[in-house]
Image (cartoon, helix red, strand yellow):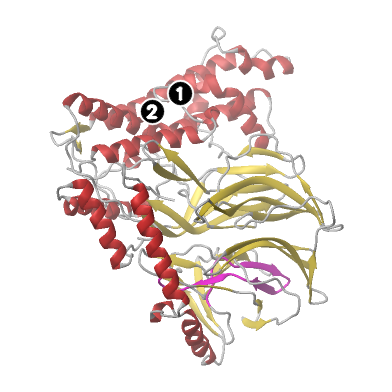
Amino acid sequence: MGKKSKKPGKGKEKTERKTAKAEEKRARRESKKLSPEDDIDAILLSIQKEEAKKKEVHVDENVPAPSPRSNCSLTVNPLKDTELILYGGEFYNGSKTFVYGDLYRFDVEKMEWKLVSSPNSPPPRSAHQAVAWKNYLYIFGGEFTSPNQERFHHYKDFWMLDLKTNQWEQLNLKGCPSPRSGHRMVLYKHKIIVFGGFYDTLREVRYYNDLHIFDLDEFKWQEIKPRLGSMWPSARSGFQFFVYQDQIYLYGGYYKEVSSDKNSSASEKGIVHADMWSLDPKTWEWNKVKKSGMPPSARAGFSMCVHKKRAMLFGGVVDMEMEGDVMMSLFLNELYGFQLDNHRWYPLELRKEKSTKVKSRKDSKQETPGSDYNDEVNIEAETSGIDDKDQIMEYDEQAGDEESNIDEMSEHIVANMTIDDERSIKSASKPQQTKSKSKFNVQDSVSPEVVKPCGRINSCMVVGKDTLYIYGGMMEVKDQEITLDDLYSLNLSKLDEWKCIIPASESEWVEASEDEDDEDDDDDDDSEDEGESGSDDEETDDDDEAKGTNDGTKSVQMGDAVALIRGEGKNLRRKEKRVRIEQIRANLGLSDSQRTPTPGESLRDFYRRTSLYWQMAAHEHTQHTGKELRKDGFDLAEARYRELKPLLDELAILEAEQKAEEAEGPETSSRKRGKKRV
């Protein structure tokens, strides 16, 4: 993930040097020459000794919110559906990895966190799984990473937490699954079902597709093996597992394929799955589920959960290869529904609240002649036997009014920006005072602001009392990993708006996390390519830009919808501008064209072109028909258009700048040293 740019003519030599250094590292690790931070056995032993000092359960009331983390577990308390139980997770700050073993309980109604400390607690872990049954929370597997990410320990331990007493107990039982992380675990009646995952050693990475059952009545493990000739999902981790009635569903996942060439050098290729399977818990037979409706694009790191008759999918990442050997990672914040009774996918769009102004305007309108809409818009009107030409024209006029309002906002954004002699974007007038510390934010210029979680991977997602909760996860801004600690909720009965219960805090990032010899190697390459200095100035700009992304809650929320134009006097260099243009183009083209406006397209034209799509999306969660369905469809289209308009405006500005720069002459700025990614 992140940007990875290759330098012409240097790829082969650099790859050979890095391969040699990787082999040296591997040899050092295998010869036990470890730094204290990499001695994972010593670290875990030290943690175990500290745990042994605890003699009783201690609960701290009303404590600060947990630190940012991803790959943690969030579970609804089966004894109280307004309490969420958070355990474990990890945080990477660019230099070190921190793995947590803390247990929090969050009261949604009181908005209070409790921190629970108990004797005989599990050691810290991430990428584990947790399910709740009766008054117990069960946790299996996961991994512990050394601070320098040189060593990994995978767990096979199985734990039970009494939610009434906060006491932990380790269940040492025969037949449990092998050590792993990235697996998935669900509860079906009185059985816990575990599938898949991976195990990473120094020499190899293994992915699993084994199926294990734990009987909560008999307290016994059982492995279910495939029958000869039966269908079975391939090995994977990071998939999603959920239950509906007497079926267990599996969707997506990730698998790393290792291949060797003729020179015996191994290469790795990541495979993202987008298949769906159903498991019958009576016969333990798998069957493939056929896709229908409007499924999401293939992605990794997404989250899913079930509410009534539908499963919901949120987030994920798509890695895309752009021009110039640039790899772009797009972190998504789309929400999809999967109807479990008819196996249909559809985008879950929020419903727009009815405006009294629109209603009064509709009441005052007189009947007008029919419109020239395309025939697709009138399909439902013809089948219902109602003449809706007047209504369609009314919505055509409404679209025109809304379009002019949005266009006025866009013109205001452009009118209040000038491009100075140094090609930097400035605000022509002093912006109004705002709580956000960011110097200029497109999102601030478009009112009201759309509140929604930013794109992310490995977040927690649960449903309690008809409310969807999304917590934490990770995203990337440039080459920095931003670990999140925000909490959002969505009322699934209304589907009207996201609520930010806990805003994201500033994320810590430490530069230069690589070995000194690797740094020197990169510097040598750069000195050969560049031939001149200037990297210090470049990196200072990057630092300023990184601070801007963490400056205030709004700046951290960098979803697909809104682009940040940062800083007075900030110079977006040509290479960065090209990358940003490609990112926006890819971002706009990622979703189905039916839900994405094209540059320069008006709201009226966008709705004309996509009206059938929005009516279908609206029908999935309103069940309206006729006029009401068209109203709902227009509301969804208008909300989507308003959401993406700033991004389209930014694209227009950047492309205009790029065209002007190309007319001026060739690029003269020095190349920026690329940050190395592991």
From the viewer's side, name the closer residue of 233 and 112: 233
Question: Magenta segment: does it hold 38?
Answer: no
- Foreground residue among 87 and 436: 87
**472 left or right of 248?**
left
Residue 141, horizontal then vertical, whole percent: 62, 71
Mark 2 residue crowding within 10 angstroms, few (<14) / some (14–19) / many (20+)? many
Give x and y (percent) for residue 665: 17, 27
* x, y percent for residue 168: 63, 82
Please give the residue where the numbered disc 1 appears in the rendered image. Answer: 603
Mark nearer the N terminus (1 vs 2): 2
Mark 1 in CB contact with mark 2 (< 8 angstroms): yes
Question: From this viewpoint, is residue 586 visible?
Answer: yes
Q: Position of residue 123 (x, y in %)?
A: 55, 79
Separation of residues labelled 1 and 2 (CA atoms): 9 Å
Please tell me the numbered disc located at residue 534.
Answer: none
The residue located at (51%, 92%) in the rendering is: 53
Where is residue 211, by image quadrant? bottom right
Residue sitting at 50 percent across and 25 percent down?
Answer: 360
Q: Which residues are magenta?
A: 124-149
- Report the quarter where the C terminus lies: bottom left
